[in-house]
Amino acid sequence: MLSENSRNMESLQTVALILLPMFIGFAIRLPKPYLRFADRLLNALVYVILLLIGMGLAHMGGLLRQLGNIALYTSVLSILLILCNLSALMLLDKLLPWQGKIVQESECASHSFGGSLGQIIVVGLGILLGLWLPESILPSERAATAALMLLVFVVGLQLRGNGIPLKTVLLNTRGMQICIVFVFSSLLAGMLFAACFNDVSWSKGLALSSGYGWYSLSGIMMTKAYGADWGSVALFNDLLREFFALTFVPVLMRRSSAAAVGIGGATSLDFTLPLIRRSGGLAAVTVAISFGFITNLLAPLLMLVFSAFK
């Protein structure tokens, strides 16, 4: 009973550490010139966290022996998530068509795609540094937690900096519809993932499927909950979601606007938003911001809730 109460207390503390900085950031309205600095700081923090995650992976016992399992779990989880999300979101468009205006423009995602590739390279660099540097001088886990708290604080600043009132975001009907379908189809994928492997509980499957593309968050949270190997699965799964979104958003927008907006998950608010803007127009941007805002709030909360069941 004592250990259970201790675990619940730790979960509440983790919720506060993750969500409180975001709400504090959202309560602060920065002038636009400072928002540019916030954008640069956020990009830098993403790379710092990925580097720290890589260093942590370097000291995971039997890293090389685990690579095959990590690749298998990541591949299966990513395929299930993308298939379930796409099927459900395309069905939404058929049952409840959206009348937003689609803008046909030439697309070039090479810059964003290269940025995603650079993020994977940074993880690899972190692994190399972790193997090369003495363990005594490597950053502690607290450094990653502090960087994560600062990152979600800056995300809160950016959410407020979009200039869209919270009421407008939460009451965007299409954004809410896409979010509901996306979340439930992701949960279905998590359950299917758990059914595929004997060593994956239903709660672990649901937790791993709730990262929604926020790899810098899911990598750290799943590492704390299940260990570095499962943190790696979460990290690479959410990075693959970003790769897929950056590659296929323009194609999907011509066939299913809900799939185009939703497939990027939480990245629809940042990394994939410019692509959504160019391929779907301003109407799609409003929906994407609403959807991305809600999924940014849900991702840490759902990962914490599901991982608490172990």
Image: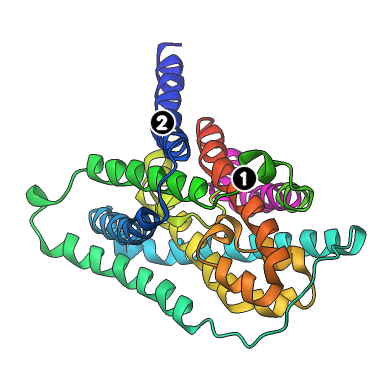
Tell me residue 246's x, y (percent). 56, 74
The answer to whether the residue labelled 1 contacts the one labelled 2, judged by CB atoms less than 8 Å apart, is no
- How many numbered circles are shown? 2
Tell me residue 241's x, y (percent). 56, 65
- Which residue type carries mark 2? Thr
- Sort mark 2 into few (<14), some (14-19) or many (20+) by Cα contacts within 10 Å: some
Residue pictured at 62% horizontal, 55% vertical: 289
The front one of 84 and 203 is 84
Q: Which mark is residue 14?
A: 2
Q: Determine the secondary structure under disc 2.
A: helix
N-term mark: 1 or 2? 2
Tell me residue 66's x, y (percent). 37, 60
- Which residue type carries mark 1? Ile
Q: Which mark is residue 44?
A: none
Q: Residue pushed farthest top?
A: 1
In the rendered view, does 175 fall on the left or right side of 60?
right
Range drawn in magenta: 181-209
Looking at the picture, does residue 164 appear above or below residue 308?
below
The front one of 241 and 265 is 265
- 186 inside magenta stretch: yes
Residue 83 in sight here: no
Q: Which mark is residue 294?
A: 1
In the rendered view, does 193 fall on the left or right side of 34?
right
